[in-house]
Image: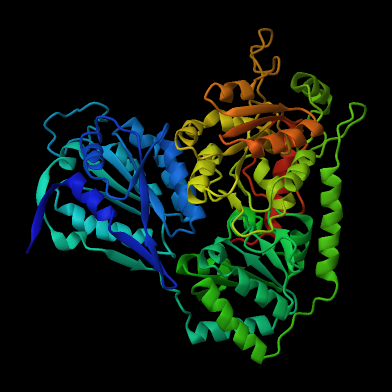
């Protein structure tokens, strides 16, 4: 056997260079590059290997370990999971920072390869710098915390272990049914240890993503179920995007006259203007999709995991004789909601079901219901886009929480802009090919309801984990995946403050991202949640501590986010009027570097709910009448919801 003597880290880099993906006959390199933040736990191992011979891997310098890993997650998502980036950190806090991103990847079933440094396998210098000592188990390190948030986890304590570990890692990273974060912990001494690796280990490896077919029995059962139903509803999930099944889904809807509702991950697979697309469904959904979901006698979930925001905590699907059919590559997800499951690739299954239903001459019984629901929502959306603040008697969309404070907010922000008004204008001002990125706060709900996406893969929402801080890092990852498109990160002020350091990397890499920062001086979404369930405004507004009360109920904090970002070298504007918004958007399009628009919007002017219920925990014991009522209301809604 011909061998080559390499360190563990050198062998790792050589192996990553030789991995390829094949999908529908198209081949491309699987690993685009490596995000790095070097420390004592990885700089002399993986760092040395990348300096000496990176091969074709591009090396990117992150600014925050969570941020760079989120960029890698977004890159893989925008690449439809067919190309990824790896991330390496030092031991201890550097590794721990990536745990959040690992959870984000796994929750969304997005492949990412994490390579944290680890403590010494030899244990000679124990406790090494940044090592956690557990008196009950000395084998534990920070990296064990990756176990519950990874789809595959390993620790390499001998150089030869790398071979079997990496082969298994590639299996998981390329599995459409069960992918997510893959974590391989690398003790810093082992990274530099040498071994005679067989050259065969470094041969070109092609990982084929096959379109899994369904069994005839499952397809026949699905076709028979559909034939028995009069008013089905299709739910388009992220699996439709990754399967490239958009055209098949549209043809299916058109042929059998079935409306299509979108999840956050499925949005922009189908053009918003498509005659059977009724828009976003669930707690963050619109009035049209949610009305049809309540009345549907069959829910057909295609490539969706049925999370609680999608299904309205199992309460939205309310027809007394309703059934559920799922098409999913994952047996785990296909079995949810006690469904009739078709375990298969989305496009393959849709085409096979299409043929069966054509032979059965199936059509739904919808007449004017879909068009009427869409028209009703169009009217409502138009109203939302035209809401303007009037200090005299103004009632915000989230009404009755702190109406009396609106004037104070308007004065401190020096703005009368409403959030829905701004979003409506932005939808008109952005080019159709631009990609919008979001993750948390009130914006995902507003965007799923109001945003019209006409081009494929132009709506990039991380909502499997709804991770604050993903937005700007995610925009960088999207821009790296599609550098020819304009990319816009929609984020609130709270999320911006949590994590925006990858703006520096965007400048360094000359990858322009545009940050649309909605400043309403607080964690507005959670303020709505607490006050909507009987609490007061507690710990969610950005207010100074009041010397008189000792509480955070003093003056509102006024922050100049444009000035903050401009210090990094980002081109910035502050927006307080609709004219300024239009001018700033045209200006941003002309810039060649990353931009930030500091948009001052009034709180409570986001969209409210449209018929779906979110099951959240409410205190069953309280002295406050409002909280007691909220607890009673919850118990009542639970009685109407599915128990599993």
Say above or below: 462 vs 30.
Answer: above
The answer to whether residue 70 is visible is yes
Which of these two is toward me, 95 or 548?
95
Q: Is residue 391 left or right of residue 191?
A: right
Residue 324: image quadrant is bottom right
Q: Is residue 522 left or right of residue 364?
A: left
**Colouring used for the render:** rainbow
Q: Residue furthest left?
A: 1
Q: Is residue 552 left or right of residue 134?
A: right
Q: How far across and how far down the image is residue 630, in percent?
A: 72, 41
Residue 306: image quadrant is bottom right
Image quadrant for the N terminus? Answer: bottom left
Which of these two is toward me, 527 or 211?
211
Say above or below: 334 vs 363.
Answer: above
- At x 86% / y 72%, what residue is drawn? 368
Residue 512: image quadrant is top right
Which of these two is toward me, 261 or 633?
261
Image quadrant for the C terminus? Answer: bottom right
Q: How far across and how far down the image is residue 535, in percent?
A: 70, 32
- At x 77% / y 23%, what residue is drawn? 409
Q: Residue furthest bottom?
A: 359
The answer to whether residue 341 is visible is no
Total labels: the figure holds 0
Q: How far across and how far down the image is residue 121, in percent?
A: 16, 39
Q: Residue furthest top?
A: 547
Say above or below: 594 vs 564.
Answer: below
Q: How far across and how far down the image is residue 361, in percent?
A: 71, 90
- At x 65% / y 46%, what residue is drawn? 444
Say above or below: 22 vs 87.
Answer: below
């Amino acid at each position: 056997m011909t061998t080559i003597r390499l360190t563990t880290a050198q062998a790792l880099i050589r192996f990553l260079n030789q991995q390829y993906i094949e999908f529908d006959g198209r081949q491309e390199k699987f690993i685009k590059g490596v995000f790095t933040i070097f420390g004592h736990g990885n700089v002399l191992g993986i760092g040395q290997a990348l300096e000496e011979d990176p091969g074709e891997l591009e090396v990117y310098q992150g600014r925050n370990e969570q941020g760079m890993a989120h960029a890698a997650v977004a890159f893989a998502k925008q690449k439809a999971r067919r190309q990824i980036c790896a991330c390496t950190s030092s031991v201890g806090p550097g590794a721990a920072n990536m745990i959040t991103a690992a959870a984000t990847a796994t929750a969304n079933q997005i492949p990412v390869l994490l390579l944290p440094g680890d403590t010494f396998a030899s244990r000679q210098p124990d406790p090494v710098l940044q090592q956690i000592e557990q008196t009950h188990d000395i084998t534990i390190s920070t990296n064990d915390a990756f176990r519950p948030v990874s789809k595959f986890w390993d620790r390499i304590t001998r150089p030869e272990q790398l071979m079997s570990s990496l082969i298994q890692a590639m299996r998981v990273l390329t599995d459409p049914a069960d992918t997510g974060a893959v974590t391989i912990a690398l003790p810093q001494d082992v990274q530099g240890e040498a071994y005679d690796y067989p050259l065969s280990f470094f041969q070109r490896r092609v990982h084929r993503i096959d379109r899994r077919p369904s069994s005839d029995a499952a397809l026949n059962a699905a076709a028979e179920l559909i034939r028995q139903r009069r008013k089905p509803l299709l739910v388009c999930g992220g699996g439709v995007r990754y399967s490239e099944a958009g055209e098949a889904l549209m043809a299916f809807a058109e042929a059998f006259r079935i409306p299509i509702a979108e999840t956050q991950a499925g949005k922009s697979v189908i053009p918003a203007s498509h005659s059977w697309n009724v828009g976003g469904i669930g707690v963050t959904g619109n009035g049209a999709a949610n009305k049809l979901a309540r009345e549907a006698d069959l829910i057909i979930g295609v490539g969706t995991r049925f999370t609680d925001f999608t299904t309205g905590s199992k309460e939205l699907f309310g027809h007394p004789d309703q059934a559920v059919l799922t098409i999913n590559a994952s047996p785990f997800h296909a079995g949810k909601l006690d469904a009739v499951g078709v375990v298969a690739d989305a496009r393959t299954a849709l085409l096979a079901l299409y043929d069966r239903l054509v032979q059965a001459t199936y059509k739904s019984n919808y007449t004017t219901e879909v068009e009427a629901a869409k028209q009703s929502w169009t009217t409502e959306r138009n109203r939302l886009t035209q809401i303007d603040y009037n200090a005299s008697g103004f009632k915000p969309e989230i009404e009755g929480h702190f109406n009396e404070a609106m004037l104070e907010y308007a004065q401190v922000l020096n703005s009368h802009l409403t959030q829905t008004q701004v979003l409506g204008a932005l939808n008109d001002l952005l080019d159709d090919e631009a990609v919008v990125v979001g993750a948390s706060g009130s914006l995902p709900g507003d965007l799923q309801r109001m945003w019209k996406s006409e081009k494929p893969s132009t709506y990039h929402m991380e909502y499997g984990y709804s991770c604050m801080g993903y937005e700007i890092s995610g925009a960088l990852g999207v821009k790296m995946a599609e550098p020819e498109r304009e990319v816009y990160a929609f984020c609130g002020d709270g999320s911006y403050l949590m994590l925006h350091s990858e703006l520096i990397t965007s400048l360094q890499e000359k990858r322009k991202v545009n940050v649309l920062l909605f400043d309403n001086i607080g964690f507005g979404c959670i303020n709505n949640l607490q006050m909507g369930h009987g609490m007061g405004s507690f710990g969610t507004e950005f207010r100074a501590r009041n010397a008189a009360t000792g509480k955070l109920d003093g003056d509102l904090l006024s922050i100049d986010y444009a000035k903050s970002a401009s210090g990094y070298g980002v081109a910035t504007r502050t927006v307080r009027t609709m004219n300024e918004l239009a001018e700033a958007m045209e200006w941003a399009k002309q810039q060649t570097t990353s931009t930030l628009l500091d948009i001052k919007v009034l709180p409570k002017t986001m969209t409210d709910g449209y018929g779906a219920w979110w099951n959240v925990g409410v205190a069953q014991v309280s002295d406050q009448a409002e909280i007691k009522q909220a607890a009673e209301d919850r118990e009542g809604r639970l009685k109407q919801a599915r128990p599993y």
